[in-house]
Amino acid sequence: MRTTLNLNPELARTAKRVASERGVTLTALIEEGLQGVLTDRRRTKAFRLNLPVIRGRRAPTVDLADRDRLYELLDQPD
């Protein structure tokens, strides 16, 4: 598949140099790096967010679509 990437110019120069040193195309180098990232991602454990439970007053319920009310709640002092 053909696609367009916007790369940092310094990164692109370095990638071209490394590809040339390895005797591969820039496409092959990018594919190798992307495959490595995707493979490592599959091996890592799923992230689990453990939030502390704090007893006290009940958290306010707010409709996230109501931006004005959300900002009001965020601006209230504790």
Image: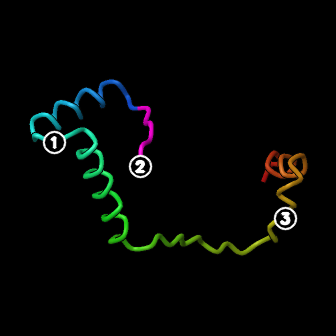
Q: Which residues are magenta?
A: 1-6
* Residue 24 marker: 1
Amino acid on which the number 3 mark rests in the picture: Pro
What x and y, as percent, mark residue 66?
Answer: 89, 53
Amino acid on which the number 1 mark rests in the picture: Val
Name the residue carrying label 2. 1
Mark 3 vs 1: CB contact within 8 A? no
Q: Which comes sooner in the sequence, label 3 or label 2? A: 2
Measured Cα–Cα span from mark 3 to mark 2: 49 Å
Q: Which comes sooner in the sequence, label 1 or label 2? A: 2
What x and y, as percent, mark residue 6?
Answer: 44, 32
Of residue 67 and residue 17, the one placed in the foreground of this image is: 17
Give the mark toward the camera: 1 or 2. Answer: 2
Taking the spot 86% from the left edge, 55% from the top edge, the residue there is 65
Amino acid on which the number 2 mark rests in the picture: Met
Give the mark toward the camera: 3 or 2. Answer: 2
User: Magenta stretch containing residue 23, yes or no?
Assistant: no
Measured Cα–Cα span from mark 1 to mark 2: 18 Å
Give the mark toward the camera: 3 or 1. Answer: 1
Name the residue carrying label 3. 60
Q: Which coloring applies here?
A: rainbow
